[in-house]
Image: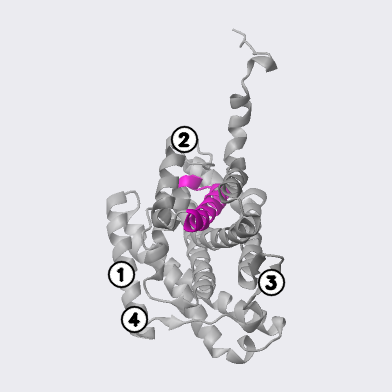
Amino acid sequence: MNETTLPPEAVSWRERLGPYLPHLIVPIVALLGLMLMGNFPAWATLTIAGIAMGMMIFVMASGLTLVFGLMDILNFGHGAFISLGAFVGASVLLALTGLTGSTSLLANLLAIGAALLAAVAVSGALGFLFERVIVRPVYGAHLKQILVTMGGLIIAEQLIHLIWGPNAIPLPRPTALRGSWSFGEVVVEKYRMAAVMLGLVIFAALHWALVKTRLGLLIRAGVENREMVEAMGYRVQRLFVLVFVAGSALAGLGGVMWGLYDELITAHMGLDILILIFIVVIIGGLGSVQGCFVGALLVGLMANYTGYLAPKIALGSNILLMVVILMWRPQGLLPAAKS
């Protein structure tokens, strides 16, 4: 029986626009923010700040969405990698004050590069141990995953207290990344622009790795049909361990970025930001790097716009955002395709 094809004029504009709306929601929210503020310099300043905040959240959340969506693991210990990465990165930066205090941008970037590499290495190593010791015994048991990963997070926080002490540690930014540029009445912080550029590079690298490489193809195929991939001679378990380690390393990298953003780090900073990260993962769609990117930008913009327009509801604005998104698209904005 042949399917009846509707003429183009019979398809409503809503049906035509529907598939593109998740991709357009960020500029729509930005435009709505401009209309509500009616003040272009304030809007531009807050928009850039919101995008920078979103980029930092994306870096921390991208690992969790891969672990959550591809491995079906509820990892509430993700905050441990953020805190540990921040403390390791801070230790490196505070040891390289000769470079961070220099007015040379190259010297500052060398110090930050060393801090990020150290945070990635240590967080990735902790992620490997975390998966082997804590997560692997509870594969497929979601309630147990929540309990043991929360326990792992608490243990990690106590270890940070033991090594670095119980007090918060100030983390000043390198000299070249302090201050801001002014374009008329629009103010752009140098560090926020650096965070935007780094976030874009990480997003592009993740997208390329998952879509364009053989490794990414195997990971996605393993999610859709594990038995088929194993029948071809590949060990899917090893691929998933690699995903977990990569997600942990990204969280550590994001921890350094967030620490420099706040200029203060604490052992519980990973737990504090975990709610925002889960909101981003859920509204973006589980397992979707692209959805995580869009969700993080939405959360960043919403936090900055509501902080300006209605400070009293700023704390709950992202919860409201999640409710609205899930009522519209229960599967998230751009969920990963699964068979």
Asked whether residue 248 appears in the rendered view, the answer is yes
Does the image show residue 238? no
Which tag, 4 or 1, sits closer to the chain's start?
1
Q: Quadrant of the N terminus?
A: top right
Nearest to viewer (mark 3 / mark 1): 3
- Few, some or many C-alpha atoms within 10 Å of disc 1 (few <14, some 14-19, many ≥20)? some
For the residue pair 238 and 139, the one nearer the viewer reads as 139
Which is in the foreground here, disc 2 or disc 3?
3
Q: Are marks 2 and 4 in contact (CB under 8 Å)?
A: no
Q: Amino acid at mark 1?
A: Ile
**Of circles 1 and 2, which is in front?**
2
Q: CA distance from mark 3 to mark 1?
A: 41 Å
Residue 161 circle label? 4
The mark that comes first in sequence, 2 or 4, is: 4
Task: Determine whether 155 is above or below 105 in the image.
Answer: above
Alpha carbons under labels 2 and 3: distance apart: 39 Å
Which three-letter amino acid code belongs to the residue tagged 4?
His
Q: Residue furthest top?
A: 1
Q: Secondary structure at mark 1?
A: helix
Q: Counting residues from the N terminus, which is met first, the one under dot 3 or under dot 1?
A: 1
Relative depth, front residue between 64 and 57: 57
Decide whether residue 113 is among the magenta residues: no
Whole-angstrom CA distance, mark 4 to mark 3, is 38 Å
Query: Residue 271, percent across and down?
Result: 37, 65
